[in-house]
Image (cartoon, rainbow, N blue to C red):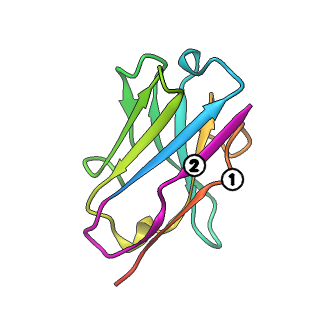
Amino acid sequence: VQLVESGGGLVQPGDSLRLSCVTSGFTFGTYSMHWVRQAPGKGPQWVSTINRDGDHTGYPDSVKGRFTISRDNAKNTLYLQMDNLKPEDTATYYCTKGFASLAAPRGQGTQVTVSS
């Protein structure tokens, strides 16, 4: 099982980023997928969930209306479109397989820093 996140970077408040998570080693389309983030000195925070078919999604209030999770089962890839980024979105972002937990199979993470 391999998950590789990319797309993070240093941006200003109000900017957008699109994260990608390319997966391999498992049947991607049979698992729910999730994004989880962890800021320095803080615990993990669930960011978003998408079901196997991509027709149901979920978000916490902190990102609802700003973040959009999507998936391409043909490409075994998960995405997170992040708009109107805020400094409090600064964290390492992980995609996880099956469960919204850093204990689940996940990648190495991609760093997102929002700062003026």
Asked if residue 60 shows in the view, the reply is no
Q: Tell me the quadrant of the picture where the N terminus can be found.
A: top right
**Mark 2 lies on residue:** 5
Do the CB atoms of the residues marked 2 and 1 lie less than 8 Å apart? yes
Please state which amino acid type lies under the numbered disc 1.
Answer: Gln
Q: Quick one: SS at disc 1? A: loop
Numbered circle sitting on residue 108: 1
Is residue 52 one of those drawn in magenta? no
Please state which amino acid type lies under the numbered disc 2.
Answer: Glu
Which residue is depicted at the point 47% across and 20% down? 74
Q: Position of residue 96 (x, y in %)?
A: 62, 38
In the rendered view, does 101 fall on the left or right side of 35?
Answer: right
In the rendered view, does 11 fall on the left or right side of 20?
Answer: left
45 vs 91: above or below:
above
41 vs 1: above or below:
below
Is residue 5 one of those drawn in magenta? yes
Seen as rendered, the residue at the extreme bottom is 116
The alpha-carbon separation of the residues under discs 2 and 1 comes to: 7 Å
